[in-house]
């Protein structure tokens, strides 16, 4: 190999290495620019405070004061949260459950997504209410205290409805 060929080869390697380094540095700058927090102080929507409200709550009338299911929707206009427990001064216990096509299992917590909703509905996530202090009747309201990881406790009055009740249907 002649000295001219060796110099050309070194120049090509240097140019290729320079191009690779420039690409890597340029890509890093682009990623850094895309990763700016937009003035949120490094806090994204999932880390901000949860802003919760409860809607569409109801309990289908249980047979002779027995075990009942509870349904509601927790709407969240803020950051992610978790429903940790549910209690009631008028019931011995309230547990959270998840239903699938063939099973029902008790769960320790339910996620409330950022800018989303947690739905407790027939055939899915729901509450099981047991040990009523007084047998419920149509129109009664049961107080439920919903405890969240970040938002604390929210108390709601949940009406007892007929067994066939479905929110949003007349």
Image (cartoon, rainbow, N blue to C red):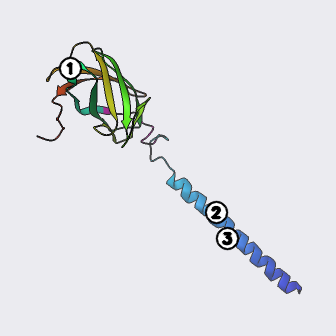
- Mark 3 lies on residue: 19
Q: Is residue 66 left or right of residue 1?
A: left
Q: Residue furthest left?
A: 170
Q: Percent x, y for residue 147?
A: 37, 24
Q: Nearer the viewer, mark 1 or mark 3?
A: 1
Q: Is residue 157 left or right of residue 39?
A: left
Tell me the magenta residue range.
Answer: 44-52
Q: Percent x, y for residue 153?
A: 35, 22
- Mark 2 lies on residue: 24
Indicate whether 160 appears above or below 34.
Answer: above
Examine the image and state in which quarter residue 157 appears. Answer: top left
Instruction: Please rate how many residues cluster around mark 3, counting C-alpha atoms within 10 Å: few if below 14, some from 14 to 19, many from 20.
Output: few
Tally of marks: 3
Is 50 inside the magenta-drawn segment? yes
Circle nearer the N terminus (1, 2): 2
Helix, strand or loop status at disc 3: helix
Circle nearer the N terminus (1, 3): 3
Measured in 3D between alpha carbons, the distance from the residue under mark 2 to the one under mark 3, in whole angstroms, is: 9 Å
Instruction: Please rate how many residues cluster around mark 1, counting C-alpha atoms within 10 Å: few if below 14, some from 14 to 19, many from 20.
Output: few
Examine the image and state in which quarter residue 159 appears. Answer: top left
Residue occupying image coordinates x 80% and y 80%: 9
Look at the image and tell me in which quarter the N terminus lies.
bottom right
Circle nearer the N terminus (2, 3): 3
- Residue 64 numbered tag: 1
Are the residues flagged by discs 1 and 2 in contact, CB closer than 8 Å?
no
Examine the image and state in which quarter residue 68 appears. Answer: top left
Q: Is residue 163 left or right of residue 68?
A: left
Residue occupying image coordinates x 42% and y 42%: 45
Q: Percent x, y for residue 151?
A: 38, 27
Q: Is residue 7 left or right of residue 85?
A: right
Residue occupying image coordinates x 33% and y 39%: 124
Indicate whether 88 appears above or below 31.
Answer: above
């Amino acid at each position: 190999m002649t000295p001219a060929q060796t110099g050309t080869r070194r120049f090509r390697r240097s140019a290729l290495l320079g191009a690779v380094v420039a690409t890597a540095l340029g890509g890093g700058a682009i990623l850094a620019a895309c990763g700016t927090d937009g003035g949120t102080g490094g806090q994204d929507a999932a880390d901000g405070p949860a802003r919760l409200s409860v809607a569409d709550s109801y309990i289908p009338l249980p047979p002779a004061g027995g075990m009942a299911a509870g349904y509601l929707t927790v709407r969240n206009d803020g950051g992610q949260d978790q429903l940790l427990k549910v209690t009631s001064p008028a019931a011995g216990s309230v547990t959270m459950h998840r239903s699938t096509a063939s099973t029902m299992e008790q769960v320790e917590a339910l996620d409330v997504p950022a800018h989303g909703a947690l739905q407790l509905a027939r055939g899915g996530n729901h509450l099981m209410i047991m040990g009523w202090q007084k047998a419920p009747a149509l129109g009664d309201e049961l107080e439920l205290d919903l405890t969240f990881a970040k938002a604390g406790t929210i108390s709601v009055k949940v009406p007892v409805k007929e067994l066939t009740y479905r929110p949003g249907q007349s």
